[in-house]
């Protein structure tokens, strides 16, 4: 057992920005339902489960009544059992019944398959069906398994287009389980929403009407997410009845070394000091860093602070470990042989490596949901400690000054847009390939699918409906992580492995020749960008600089879809086209952000259409700011800080958002600020900004007002992705404008 006293002495000093305690909570239980199949009851009893948490019983009962459910209780609250119970019950009762489980990663599917196996319920035959499944096993699984665990890509390319092989399975499909549903947001989520609609449609064609059971991290909009993903209403189960130990939360801000430049002491150094301090007090601690390099440095710095014997009890943990290697680390942690583990975020997604006392997050991981998942590992044995060590990023620093924004409000929404034509069209083609498309499909695919059908090349209208007239299966041409089919492949020059995709809209600014590219926490240097072959060749990179592209951006308004009077001005949401040309890049020092070199680039311009929110400040809101370049600098600083804060409202990365501010825009004839969705066609980010404009602007004004710098720094108005390399930024002018808007 640990007590607060054991870490009290460590959590002192100016670095401690906030200390809070989340109280312990008793479990609220419900009896195991009488209606549950005896085989399932027995299996639970064998595992020592003689009662359920109230939310598990609620999820089971809601599913029993035939409804769809989304469970959004906290980390380690038994969400898995909540959606497993109705499924296992159905499989035990009816030997024909079938279920599909969708997991975003193979490792998570493996974990779930193991825990289902451990329950040992006779008649439940679970099998993983993914890219690693050998062809000879696949046929066997289709015939034998009644619970198939797979991933969206396999469903999209491997299962749905070959539904004839799955006819029996689809005919008997009772449940579709979507675990970690909050992961399906943005571009990926918009695609997965269409894959689920296609699955639903085929199930109906084979005569089944499956129920959807989803689970998600805590987000602002679970019902909306369930609907957006499946096209079906779902009941929300969010009243967490699992017991919880007391948890101390510390927000830790490295000391400010230069207030004007916004430079703070090293985040990694602070994290390693905390890690060393905790393990030397015999506390089991996990430390999450954003990159592998950062994780390794923290490991090394912490080891240097400890005596040799204690340093032996620290280990780094990497993505790509096999289940055996993971279990070995878990065993060493459980037996107390290991005390500290440093890891990249790869671990964050649900995979369990045992019960720990403390969790340190190094830098805000991008979403509150991710942070909560990391923190959820601390204190499962008793009173736990969770720490966020802030980086210099604007959002991190905002949280340090406004802890309630992180700890108490729930504003972060998982958003997606399945109807974005750039996403939808590929799935309309795939659906038509799977079965002729007609009015009956509106129920599952949505009206938009039928509206798009005439615009999709290679679809022919016949008396049977729209049919696929192309040769090969169209699904393979629609990657699930891009809105443009002509994305660039990022290829490891040494082994030829494809590391990822860069959407055309972003390729020139992220994988131009000489760019430093980050993938799964590892750094690569782009050796060559082949425009013809749409391929970027990269090699592992150990240097201590990063790159920032300089680009010229123009926007033109295609159509304003919503115009409202908000905050005393005209606020618009609509379609814009964005033209960007990358003209140079800078090499910048990791240590202090200084510019090492500027290299010109010759790349063609790219144009894409997307969604944007834009506003034209009223003359009285700009009073005293009219002179150039003050006007442009004020608008530009406002744009940057708005972009920095938007991910708090719309779960996305700052890199998913673009912006443009101008003292005179051709379409509005006035000074204008644009914030646009960085993905062609838009995935709902700008729309969320429009809906939440007042709160978003209020947060942004607070961010600017609270930053200790005088004239703007990386923690407020400067942006790591500014195409103008952070020239022309006026913090005071931006704050004046935003405050006048809020006062309107
Ligand atoms: Zn600042
Ligand atoms: Zn900028």
Image (spheres, rainbow, N blue to C red):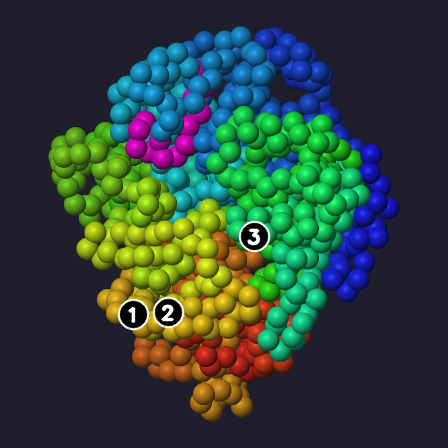
- The percent position of residue 567, horizontal first and vertical second, equals 54, 72
Q: Is residue 555 visible?
A: no
In this rendering, the count of numbered labels is: 3
Q: Can you tell which quarter of the image residue 348 is in?
A: top right
Residue reaching furthest front? 308
Q: Earlier in the sequence, mark 3 or mark 2?
A: 3
Q: Can you tell which quarter of the image residue 659 is in?
A: bottom left
Magenta span: 146-159
Kind of element beneath mark 3: helix
Q: Earlier in the sequence, mark 3 or mark 1?
A: 3
Q: Quadrant of the C terminus?
A: bottom right
Viewer-proximal residue among 27 and 587: 587
Other-residue count near label 3 (Cα within 10 Å), few / some / many at <14 / 14–19 / ≥20: many
Position of residue 154 relative to residue 706, above or below, is: above
Q: What residue is rendered at 41% in x and 32% in y?
A: 151
- Position of 540 compared to 29: left or right? left
Other-residue count near label 1 (Cα within 10 Å), few / some / many at <14 / 14–19 / ≥20: some
Circles 2 and 1: CB atoms closer than 8 Å: yes
Viewer-proximal residue among 457 and 330: 330
Q: Which residue is mark 2?
A: 585
Q: Which residue is mark 1?
A: 601
Viewer-proximal residue among 147 and 347: 347
- The percent position of residue 620, horizontal first and vertical second, equals 52, 86
Residue 156 on the magenta segment: yes
- The percent position of residue 68, horizontal first and vertical second, equals 50, 31
Circles 3 and 1: CB atoms closer than 8 Å: no
Query: Can you tell which of label 3 and label 2 is closer to the viewer?
Result: 3
Q: Is residue 318 visible?
A: yes
Which disc number belongs to residue 294? 3
Kind of element beneath mark 2: strand
Q: What residue is rendered at 63% in x and 80% in y?
A: 710
């Amino acid at each position: 057992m640990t007590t607060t006293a054991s870490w009290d002495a460590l959590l002192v000093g100016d670095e401690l920005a906030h200390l809070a305690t989340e109280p312990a909570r008793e479990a609220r239980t419900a009896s195991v339902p009488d209606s549950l199949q005896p085989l399932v009851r027995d299996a639970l009893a064998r595992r020592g489960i003689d009662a359920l948490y109230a939310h598990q019983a609620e999820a089971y009962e809601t599913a029993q009544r035939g409804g769809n459910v989304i469970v959004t209780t906290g980390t380690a609250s038994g969400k898995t059992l909540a959606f497993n119970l109705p499924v296992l019950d159905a499989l035990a009762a009816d030997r024909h019944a079938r279920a599909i489980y969708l997991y975003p990663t193979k490792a998570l599917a493996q974990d779930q398959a193991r825990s289902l196996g451990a329950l040992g319920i006779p008649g439940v035959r679970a099998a993983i069906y993914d890219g690693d499944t050998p062809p000879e096993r696949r046929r066997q699984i289709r015939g034998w398994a009644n619970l198939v665990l797979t991933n969206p890509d396999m469903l999209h390319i491997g299962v749905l287009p070959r539904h004839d092989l799955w006819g029996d399975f689809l005919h008997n499909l009772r449940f579709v389980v979507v675990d970690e549903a909050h992961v399906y947001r943005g571009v990926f989520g918009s695609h997965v929403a269409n894959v689920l609609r296609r699955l639903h449609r085929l199930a109906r064609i084979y005569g089944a009407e499956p129920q959807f059971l989803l689970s998600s991290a805590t987000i602002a909009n679970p019902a909306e997410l369930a609907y957006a993903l499946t096209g079906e209403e779902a009941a929300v189960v969010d009243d967490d009845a699992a017991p919880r130990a007391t948890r101390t939360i510390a927000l830790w801000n490295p000391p400010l070394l230069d207030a004007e430049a916004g430079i703070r002491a090293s985040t990694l150094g602070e994290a390693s000091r905390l890690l060393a301090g905790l393990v030397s007090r015999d506390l089991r601690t996990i430390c999450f860093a954003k990159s592998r390099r950062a994780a390794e440095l923290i490991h090394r710095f912490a080891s240097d602070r400890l005596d040799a014997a204690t340093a032996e009890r620290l280990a780094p943990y990497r993505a790509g470990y096999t289940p055996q290697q993971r279990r070995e680390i878990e065993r060493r942690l459980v037996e107390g042989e290991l005390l500290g583990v440093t890891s990249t975020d790869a671990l964050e997604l649900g995979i369990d490596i045992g019960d720990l006392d403390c969790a340190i997050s190094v830098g805000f991981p991008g979403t509150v949901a991710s942070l909560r998942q990391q923190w959820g590992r601390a204190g499962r044995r008793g009173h736990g400690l969770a720490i966020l060590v802030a980086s210099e990023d604007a959002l991190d620093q905002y949280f340090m000054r406004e802890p309630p924004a992180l700890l108490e409000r729930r504003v972060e929404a998982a958003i997606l847009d399945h109807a974005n034509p750039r996403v939808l069209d590929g799935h309309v083609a795939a659906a038509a390939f799977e079965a002729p498309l007609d009015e009956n499909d509106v129920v599952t695919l949505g009206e938009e699918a039928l509206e798009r059908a005439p615009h999709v090349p290679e679809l022919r209208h016949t008396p049977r409906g729209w049919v696929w007239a192309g040769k090969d299966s169209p699904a393979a041409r629609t990657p699930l992580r891009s809105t443009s089919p002509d994305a660039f492949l990022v290829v490891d020059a040494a082994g030829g492995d494809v590391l990822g995709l860069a959407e055309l809209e972003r390729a020139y600014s992220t994988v131009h020749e000489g760019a430093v590219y980050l993938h799964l926490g590892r750094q690569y240097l782009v050796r060559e960008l082949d425009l013809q072959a749409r391929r970027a060749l990269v090699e592992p990179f150990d240097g201590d600089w990063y790159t920032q592209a300089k680009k010229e951006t123009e926007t033109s308004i295609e159509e304003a879809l919503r115009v409202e009077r908000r905050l005393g001005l005209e606020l618009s949401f609509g379609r814009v086209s964005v033209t960007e040309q990358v003209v140079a890049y800078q090499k910048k020092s990791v240590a202090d952000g200084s510019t090492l070199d500027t290299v010109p680039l010759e790349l063609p311009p790219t144009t894409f259409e997307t969604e944007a929110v834009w506003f034209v400040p009223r003359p009285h809101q700009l009073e005293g700011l009219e002179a150039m370049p003050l006007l442009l600098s004020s608008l530009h600083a406002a744009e940057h800080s708005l972009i920095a804060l938007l991910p708090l409202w719309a779960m996305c990365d700052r890199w998913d958002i673009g912006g443009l501010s101008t003292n005179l825009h051709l379409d509005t004839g006035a000074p204008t600020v644009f914030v646009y969705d960085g993905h062609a066609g838009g995935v709902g980010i700008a729309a969320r900004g429009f809906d939440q404009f007042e709160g978003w602007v209020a947060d942004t004004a607070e961010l600017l007002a609270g930053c200790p710098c005088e004239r703007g720094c990386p923690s407020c108005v400067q942006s790591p992705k500014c195409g103008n390399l952070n020239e022309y930024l006026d913090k005071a002018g931006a704050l004046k404008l935003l405050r006048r808007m809020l006062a309107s």
